[in-house]
Image (spheres, rainbow, N blue to C red):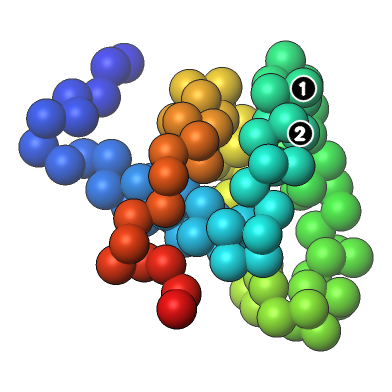
Amino acid sequence: MMINNKAGVDDPRRAKLNRLVDWVRSRGLAAPAIALLEISKPLAPIGSHMLLLLQPLVGFVGPMWGVFEEDRILAEYAALLEDPATIDQMVARLEQPESPDRAEP
């Protein structure tokens, strides 16, 4: 079944993607993230399932790192990273120069 993207149907996924890209950029990890995403693109479905498999461990240490405070968040990001088209969108967004209004002084 095809989803029509004209009416903003994909907005929740886009918002998650934007948050993930902003998180990566805020830590100065854009270049390593691009390389990792490009290298691992063929294994993306396996990687997203590994996130789900490691969910109990990440649920334990995630709050200590300030990420993934809720289990459902990890499942949502695993579903997001499962789609190769989403990975392409994330790489494209990371390759774009950061807009001046989002840059820190």
Most foreground residue, 91 or 51: 91
The picture places residue 103, in percent across and down from the top left corner, at 42, 67
Would you say the residues marked 1 and 2 are in contact, meaning their CB atoms lie under 8 Å apart? yes
Asked whether the viewer can see residue 86, the reply is no
The disc placed on residue 39 is 1
The quarter of the picture where the C terminus appears is bottom left
Most foreground residue, 41 or 103: 103
- Is 96 left, or right, of 64 in this rendering? left
- Is 96 left, or right, of 2 in this rendering? right
Q: Amino acid at mark 2?
A: Leu
Q: Which residue ends up furthest to the bottom in the rendered image?
A: 64
The picture places residue 67, in percent across and down from the top left corner, at 68, 73
The quarter of the picture where the N terminus appears is top left
* Circle 2 SS class: helix
The disc placed on residue 50 is none
Label 1 neighbour load within 10 Å: few <14, some 14-19, many 20+: few
Q: Amino acid at mark 1?
A: Ile
**Residue in view at x 26 percent, y 48 percent:** 11
Q: Which residue ends up furthest to the front in the rendered image?
A: 105
Report how many numbered discs are placed on residues in the image. Answer: 2
**Residue in view at x 46 percent, y 74 percent:** 104
Most foreground residue, 67 or 104: 104
Most foreground residue, 55 or 77: 77
> Is 2 located above or below residue 44 in the figure?
above
Q: Which residue is mark 2?
A: 36
Q: Quadrant of residue 2?
A: top left
Label 2 neighbour load within 10 Å: few <14, some 14-19, many 20+: few
Asked whether the viewer can see residue 98, the reply is yes
Q: Distance from label 1 to label 2 (Cα)?
A: 5 Å
* Circle 1 SS class: helix
**Residue in view at x 46 percent, y 31 percent:** 92
**Residue in view at x 51 percent, y 41 percent:** 94
